[in-house]
């Protein structure tokens, strides 16, 4: 049985609250498309082509919510097998989320108010980068490069959590201005959310590196316990 520290429970609750709108809100869309009542605002693109958006929401849910467990040192140290098993599921879920996101970006017909050229290209770049980082993270851990693995997965997670930051910025905009951002302004806010998340990820990666280099460091880079250093990953 894995015992989590208080700070890890706090992190989990924060991630849960921060991701609530796109992840649990998304599940409402999945229920609707599976024949349930319409609660979320109508999305004609989803009604016309429901499969990619359902895959997208389910993949994103797993990646953002279950994926948070992967950053908890207690799970990595006390149950490396759990970290590996969850990791495999999350890697697939993240790729499904990003690839279906790319598919929708390119194939759904968006009004200019919901996706201009800037957002189209940013989504194409971010979706591709998210798959790229997940693949790099998997390759890195298979070569026992633990720091590169952590850094790549953190970058992929930052892109995935872009949806949460977009929701927070969108709500903050409505509170501040009194109306929903649309058109180039909306595109700008969505792009800014991804830039912000990646900046936070780079900051965390650099602090991880600095802290690992300190002689009397408070915590160290994640290591692979010798007993599990086999071709399990
Ligand atoms: C992994 C974290 C992500 C989460 C939690 C998430 C969440 C969602 C949700 C809930 C929807 C449905 C919106 C609705 O019901 O109207 C959606 C749609 C969409 N997402 Fe994501 N998403 C994520 C990542 C991405 C990425 C990386 C891309 C870019 C490739 C992307 C592109 C899209 C597109 C194009 C749509 C369709 C929007 C529409 O039809 O209005 N998403 N996403």
Image (cartoon, rainbow, N blue to C red):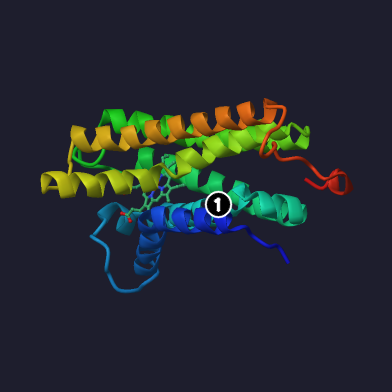
Q: Does the residue tagged 1 have its C-beta within 8 Å of any atom of ligand 1? A: no
Query: Dividing the image into 4 quarters, which one contains the C terminus?
Result: top right
The quadrant of the rendering that contains the N terminus is bottom right
User: In which quarter of the view is residue 214 placed?
Assistant: top right
Up/down of 126 relative to 160, above or below:
above
Q: Is residue 222 left or right of residue 203?
A: right
Nearer to us in this view, 22 or 131: 22
Count of numbered badges drawn on the protein: 1
Number of residues whose C-alpha sits closer than 10 Å to that of mark 1, classed few (under 14), some (14–19) or many (20 or more): some
Expressed as whole percent of the image width and height from the top left, the position of residue 44 reads 26, 55
Residue ID at (34%, 74%):
36
Q: Is residue 1 shown to the viewer in this render?
A: yes
Q: In this view, does 159 lie to the left or right of 77?
A: left
Q: Which residue is drawn at 82% across and 48% down?
A: 232
Q: Spot the residue most to the bottom.
A: 36
Residue 57 screen position, x and y as percent = 44, 55
Regarding mark 1 in the picture, which secondary structure is present there? helix
The residue located at (50%, 51%) in the rendering is 64
State the residue lying farthest toward the front: 216
Q: Nearer the viewer, residue 191 or 9?
A: 9
Residue 124 horizontal side relative to residue 137, left or right: left
Q: Where is residue 228 in the image (x, y as percent from the top left)?
A: 85, 48
Decide: is 184 above or below 226: above
The answer to whether one can see residue 88 in this image is no
**Farthest left residue in view:** 178
Q: Which residue is found at the position 41% from the left and 32% from the top? A: 124
Which residue in the structure is indicated by mark 1? 68
Residue 17 placement (x, y as % from top left): 41, 58
């Amino acid at each position: 049985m894995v015992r989590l520290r208080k700070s890890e429970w706090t992190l989990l609750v924060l991630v849960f609250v921060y991701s609530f709108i796109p992840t649990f809100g998304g599940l409402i869309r999945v229920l609707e498309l599976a024949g349930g009542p319409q609660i979320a605002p109508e999305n004609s693109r989803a009604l016309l082509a429901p499969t990619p958006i359902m895959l997208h929401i389910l993949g994103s849910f797993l990646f953002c919510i279950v994926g948070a467990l992967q950053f908890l040192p207690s799970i990595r140290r006390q149950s490396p097998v759990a970290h590996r098993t969850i990791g495999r599921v999350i890697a697939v879920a993240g790729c499904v989320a990003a690839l279906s996101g790319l598919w929708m970006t390119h194939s759904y017909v968006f009004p200019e108010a919901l996706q201009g050229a800037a957002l189209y290209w940013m989504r194409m770049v971010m979706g591709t980068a998210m798959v790229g980082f997940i693949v790099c993270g998997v390759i890195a851990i298979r070569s026992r490069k633990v720091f590169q693995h952590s850094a790549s997965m953190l970058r992929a997670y930052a892109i995935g959590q872009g949806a949460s930051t977009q929701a927070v910025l969108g709500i903050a905009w409505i509170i501040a201005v009194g109306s929903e951002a649309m058109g180039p302004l909306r595109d700008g806010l969505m792009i800014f959310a991804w830039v912000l998340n990646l900046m936070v990820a780079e900051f965390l990666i650099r602090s991880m590196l600095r802290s690992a280099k300190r002689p009397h460091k408070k915590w160290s880079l994640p290591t692979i316990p010798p007993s599990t250093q086999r071709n399990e990953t």
